[in-house]
Image (cartoon, grey):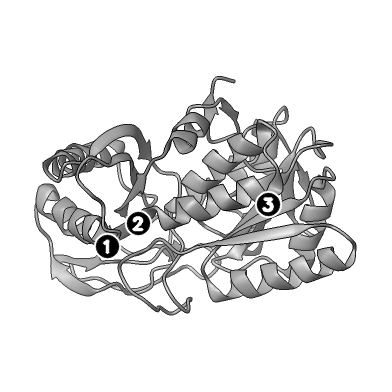
Amino acid sequence: MKALINQPDQVVTEALQGMVMAAPDLIQLHENPHYVLRADAPKTGKVALVSGGGSGHEPMHAGFVGRGMLDAACPGAIFTSPTPDQIQAASAAVNGGQGILHIVKNYTGDVLNFQMAAELLQNDGIEIHSVVIDDDVAVKDSLYTAGRRGVGATVLAEKICGAAAEAGANLNAITALCTSINDSARSMGLALSPCTNPETGQPSFTLGENEIEYGIGIHGEPGRQRIPWQPADNLTEKLMLPIIEDLPFKRGDEVLLFINGLGATPLLELNIVYRAAEKLASQHGLKVSRRLVGAYMTSLDMAGVSITLLRLDESMRTYWDAPVCTPALRWGC
């Protein structure tokens, strides 16, 4: 394996240090335990948003810490859940006195550790709400989950709910909004190649030269089936139809269409997928009024793509359009 790393056991620490050095006006790093928080944290009088998960999915989550998004992120080791003490410490550090929302992807370790941290924080008198994101339609259960996996809707929830918190919404309102986003979003992905863990130097799975993993998870979990390579338009349709049919979306729905690269997919290819996905959405009577294309929730160096559709209401549109200032998203900074 060739990679731009030093010591494998220092990959996460050095990456976090570099991220904070590149955006010192936006974020700060706490070590032992690791967590990233807003440079101006805590924000008194504001609901705090905290999320986290295994490293390897950058810019998720630390890249989304800042004004209008997360107050703190807890990065675990590569593909490993953050620990309860990380989550507890990060949450306490950004507590502004108006309660805290934990946004948790539905992976067993994440769910259990966030629950444990929430209990500890509640014992200290801090009000904690949690929303578990489970938007992946590919499979019901996988190597890491009981129930559906949490994928692309996490990015959308962190952006929209972060804007609501910045605007002064209370904890109950933000929790309800986050729940509505999860209920209104569906996602699915595929992989053209595996990812390689820098800590082990080993690929997470193997694919034949002409094979695609259809319905892949962001840790390399198996999807629905192995299929032969097909043109981009065909593969996009194979992702879009299960998404549209699952909610199900209805003709006339206004939606946000999110095309996400898994780490090694060129933007050129993501735009080809976007082209096909919006055409398919229009053919099914959906009005695409908000769009996002890029690598926002990755799987190390995996080549592949995931698609997320979110059915929008007025508050989601308003908060999506609000300014945000994080290392990964600088809209109106």
Is 16 positioned to the left or the right of 283 in the image?
right
Query: Image quadrant for the N terminus?
Result: bottom left
Is 229 positioned to the left or the right of 205 in the image?
left
Outermost residue on the right side: it is 124
Percent x, y for residue 178? 54, 51
Q: Are marks 1 and 3 in contact (CB under 8 Å)?
A: no
At 61% across and 71% down in the image, what residue appears? 111
Between disc 3 and disc 2, the foreground one is 2
Disc 3 residue crowd, few under 14, some 14–19, many 20+, Cα 10 Å: many
Disc 1 residue crowd, few under 14, some 14–19, many 20+, Cα 10 Å: few
Disc 2 residue crowd, few under 14, some 14–19, many 20+, Cα 10 Å: many
Q: How many marks?
A: 3
Task: Tell me the residue that label 3 is attached to.
Answer: 50
Is residue 60 at least partly visible in the picture? Answer: no
Name the amino acid, label 1.
Asp
Q: Are marks 1 and 2 in contact (CB under 8 Å)?
A: yes
**Residue 246 tag number:** 1
Name the amino acid, label 3.
Val
Q: Nearer the viewer, residue 176 or 86?
A: 176
Task: Tell me the residue that label 2 is attached to.
Answer: 186
Is residue 140 at least partly visible in the picture? Answer: yes
Query: Image quadrant for the C terminus?
Result: top right
